[in-house]
Image (cartoon, rainbow, N blue to C red):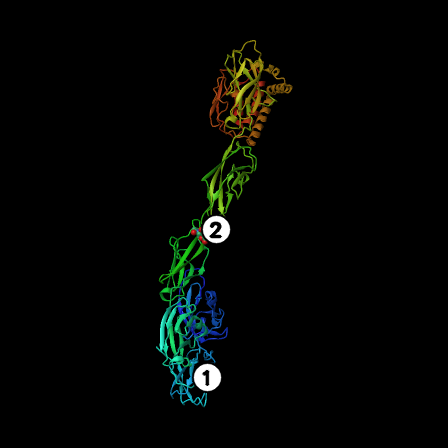
Amino acid sequence: MGDKGFSAHFSIVCFFSIFVTMHLVLGDLSYSFLEEMERGSVIGNVAKDLGVDLRTLSSRRARVDIEGTRKRYCDININTGDLFISERIDREGLCGKKASCVVKIDLVFENPLELHRVSLHVQDVNDNSPKFRENLMKMEIRESSEKGSRFSIGVAHDADIGQNDIQRYILQTNEHFILAVENKVVALVLENKLDREKQKEINLLLTALDGGSPQKSGSVVIHVTVLDANDNTPVFTQAVYKTSVPENSPPETLVITVSATDADEGVNGEVTYLFGHISGEDASLFSIDAKTGKITIAGEIDFEDTTSFEMSVGAKDGLGLIAYTKVLINIEDKNDNVPQIFLKSLSNPIPENVATDTEVGIINVQDRDSEKNGQVRCSIQENIPFKLVSSIKNYYSLITTGQLDREQVSYYNITITATDEGSPPLSSSKTLQLSVADINDNPPVFEEQSYSAYVSENNKPGSTLCSVSARDKDWRQNGTVIYSLLPGEVNGASLSSYLSINGDTGAINALRSFDYEQFRSFKVHVMARDNGSPPLSSNVTVSVFISDVNDNSPQILYPTLEGSSFMTELVPKAAHGGSLVSKVIAVDADSGQNAWLSYHIVKATDPGLFSIDLHSGEIRTQRDILESDSMKQNLIVAVKDNGQPSLSATCSMYLLISDNLAEVPELKDISYDEKNSKLTSYLIIALVSVSTFFLTFIIIILGVRFCRRRKPRLLFDGAVAIPGAYLPPNYADIDGTGTLRSAYNYDTYLTTGSRTSDFKFVSSYNDNTLPADQTLKKCSTDFSAIFGDADSSPEVGTIQYFKRLLTQKC
Ligand SMILES: *[C@@H]1O[C@H](CO)[C@@H](O)[C@H](O)[C@H]1NC(C)=O
């Protein structure tokens, strides 16, 4: 074992990692045990000594941890609480000649952090024998030496301490010398004068004994040559030489010069210097100049390894007489060790919602230098929501100081700087990257406050109406947006039968074709939800507007289009030019331009006689009726809408120029339809007969019921028409388009063809329970029948009653 001093800075570091706020408790334990114990030998029970139960020991992950290349020496058995030897412990290697050898380790518990300093007192075992520097010591002594003369010899060395160190020397019994040991200097004292003539050479066995048990010893043979002349032993100028030298001094730096003088002259007075006992390692660190006595540095002197050296130096004259002296060299510390930063634990990543003042890491700093050179301050940069708090000496906790937000800062580069207080100071730094983990704290946000979709009716099912888009600032799952439709109703049906949404893209598709005539717009609520746990969501309204397409032809309400009957208008013979004789009434279920109707006469018996108003559909005489005009006039009227392309419908209008209903029977000549003629004949017969009248009446009642039962095929929201027969010749068009607002109450006029005999009653078309087209069609058929079969003087009152009945019921 070397006799180098054990580094004062030996440290064994235990560490662990914790997550929650740290709590520190210090408690010291101390164990004393012998060096060189077997591995596994138990030196104490920490559970018992700290008063914690074994479960706590494992749940809090009690640990002894050693940093760097230093040995671990001991460990803890979590199951029993035993502290046991885990590595060979050589006291001499650890502490050299120091009287007490203490190894400090840290025993650490987690959660909360608890640090216990454990002092291990390593006791010496007599495991080293005394040793002399060489096996044979040569001395030359003059025969003339006086009794009592002293001759120093090199001492033996024992790495052990105390009782185990050298206790005494024994010199083999002989005639001439006894041993004198004073102040650790061993000398032979001449008892009986030498006589070279009797004995030229003497061999003496010197044994050094330690006080250990069992005792150990070491021996050297001293070979004394008896010389023939008188001599003086060299004498050192100082009994002890003391000096100090800074560590890391370069080789050949002068440490000290020793000097000895010899009173003799010539060869006998020539002094050479040499090291006495010096351990192998130390011998390579220093060298001595044999002639000058200068001791210089030969190797690397490290204060952290050895703080002082003690050596013996001999001065030998030409005849081999040696004097010894002691040289003490103190090594001065230089700030040559950079502080080291060790990250003991780090919770990484940390959730963004971590509370302020939460400990997220533990840092340990070490500096092998001593005193100020080894005092370290630790800091981190500013402007980050973290701080360093010194907890135990050289331990720091990294604590949060504010709220974190991953959406703003997703990670922190934290640079830890450690600076010692040497002059000049040394510092080192370490950067750690601390990630912030995402928490689902942002709901998806739609890019727009509301959305509108425009679609033409008759769209293809499956076509995309529009796309909604929402962003979520969170990460991955928490930021993944899924779209869905909220339940709702459109026109009484479930929304989901009309629309679907692509959950990933937000594209909204129509599931069926829309009909503008059914509904023009509706609202949908779309939800965007993220995938977090729990998920966050937000809603947006999408308004769907359906635009009209010209998909409905005009429908002619009057005169009826049904070929099985015809309607005839009476035109007084005295009618002047410009008289209103009838009106074509049509509706279009579309709206706007698509429902803007225009009326044209496409064919007429006498093209010059009647004209139709393009917009109102009113048919007027163009000139006065002449006797020569044909009594039966036939017009074919086309009604067109203004859509692109335009749709149209046609109807026939029969006009009878006559003042007398008696002329009506001739009407059958107007129709070239055999069926119509027949029908007319039948109806005439029926009308004549009272029973037929009642029969008809019953049929009408049944028809009315039939009308009521049927659901309206079209809703006339925009326009409705009235049969022209209800209108007087001087009827004023309501809005100029041939259509009338449904909400409009107006007077309905009845006429029998005479301008003077007008009957008036009020009816409302506001009542939409009956579909105007169908009912009016049916009714008008019956009208024509009634009119057509009216006899020479029809009962005006009866007809009026009949009409009212029809109008109201239909
Ligand atoms: C953090 O450090 C990494 C490398 O260690 C570097 O790429 C990055 O730019 C640094 N970020 C900031 C914000 O300094």
Q: Which mark is residue 648?
A: none
In the rendered view, does 301 fall on the left or right side of 793?
A: left
The residue that disc 2 covers is 534
Depth check, front residue: 776 or 509: 509
* Quarter holding residue 279: bottom left
Q: Residue furthest front?
A: 266
Name the kind of residue labelled 1 in the image: His
* Quarter holding residue 650: top right
In the rendered view, does 596 fall on the left or right side of 267?
A: right
Name the kind of residue labelled 2 in the image: Pro
Element under disc 1: strand
Depth check, front residue: 187 or 519: 187
Q: Residue furthest right?
A: 674
Q: Earlier in the sequence, mark 2 or mark 1?
A: 1
The residue that disc 1 covers is 223
Q: Position of residue 507 (x, y in %)?
A: 52, 40
User: Marks 2/1: CA distance?
Assistant: 95 Å
Depth check, front residue: 553 or 420: 420
Q: Position of residue 275 (x, y in %)?
A: 42, 76
Q: Position of residue 466 (x, y in %)?
A: 51, 38
> Where 123 sits versus 413, above or below?
below
Element under disc 2: loop
> Where 801 sits versus 25, above or below?
above
Depth check, front residue: 503 or 145: 145
